[in-house]
Image (tube, rainbow, N blue to C red):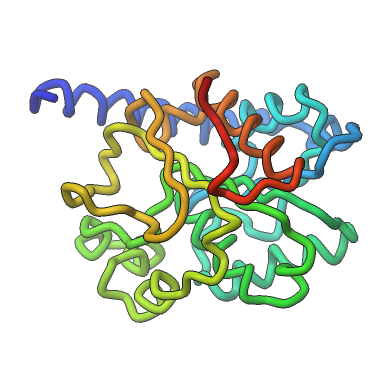
Amino acid sequence: MTGGLRLLLRAEDYAWIVAAQLRAFTAAPDPARWLSGTATPVVLVPGVWETWPVLRELGDALHEAGHPVHTVPALGTNSADLDGSARLVRDRLLELDLERVVLVAHSKGGLIAKSAFALPEVDSRVVGLVTIATPFAGSTYARWFPARAVRRLSPRDPVMRELAADVRSHPRILALRPRFDPHIPRAAGAPALAGAVEVELPLDGHFLPLGDPVLHDAVVRAVRGFSDGASGAHVHVQE
């Protein structure tokens, strides 16, 4: 991929999230529209500085597939530390008394969800985690960012190092990632989630895939696989 194309993709990526954030604040959907359905319940966990309405298109796709979809409003704009945010996810699961849940998370949301697995109340209620563009090994760009909420995602951060070393939840994680992610550089041949399943989709961008039907279909398939009792290693998201 040429440098010019990378710059164009970065611009498109930022344009998408800016538009999504504006819609989230000016015309947030009513989450009650997602509560019906008889399939496995899903809980959405957004990324850093994302409110849950940023994931509206993904929520719509999951609901159309028969899944009741829930949110974690207490996360707000999702700038708190991972441990505190994980407890908010736990509290939401207990509040709604959800069982056999699949968590679907974008970016930092995947780190929050993985952290939540360490809490016994969550571990016993969640059957799987589907992540989208999550920096499980951190992002080398994060340490240069002025905001502390992003700097915490550096590979040098002690919390990130501890979380990366904890592989107990990996059999229940399926990580979806784009071909090119402007926020998460990858070392050649290095898996982002050692010992777990990672699927590269034919999509580019950190935010752009959230609005793409290809991603929606992959997530729906992954959730269905966990619903059927498969481990991450046996969930298929592509034809």
The residue under the point 28% across, 68% down is: 155
Front-lying residue, 6 or 161? 161
Question: Quick check: can you spot residue 46?
Answer: no
Front-lying residue, 185 or 145? 185
On screen, residue 217 versus residue 200, left or right, reads right
The residue under the point 36% across, 34% down is: 178
On screen, residue 157 versus residue 219, left or right, reads left
Q: Position of residue 82 (x, y in %)?
A: 52, 70
Q: Is residue 31 above or below residue 214?
A: below
On screen, residue 64 versus residue 204, left or right, reads right
Q: Position of residue 44 (x, y in %)?
A: 66, 46
Q: Is residue 84 above or below residue 231?
A: below
Front-lying residue, 8 or 209? 209
In the rendered image, the quadrant that contains the N terminus is: top left
Q: Is residue 187 above or below residue 234?
A: below
Quadrant in the picture for residue 137: bottom left
Badge count: 0
Q: Position of residue 119 (x, y in %)?
A: 68, 76
Q: Is residue 86 above or below residue 107?
A: below
The residue under the point 66% across, 50% down is: 103
Q: Position of residue 143 (x, y in %)?
A: 23, 65
Residue found at the far left of this picture: 3
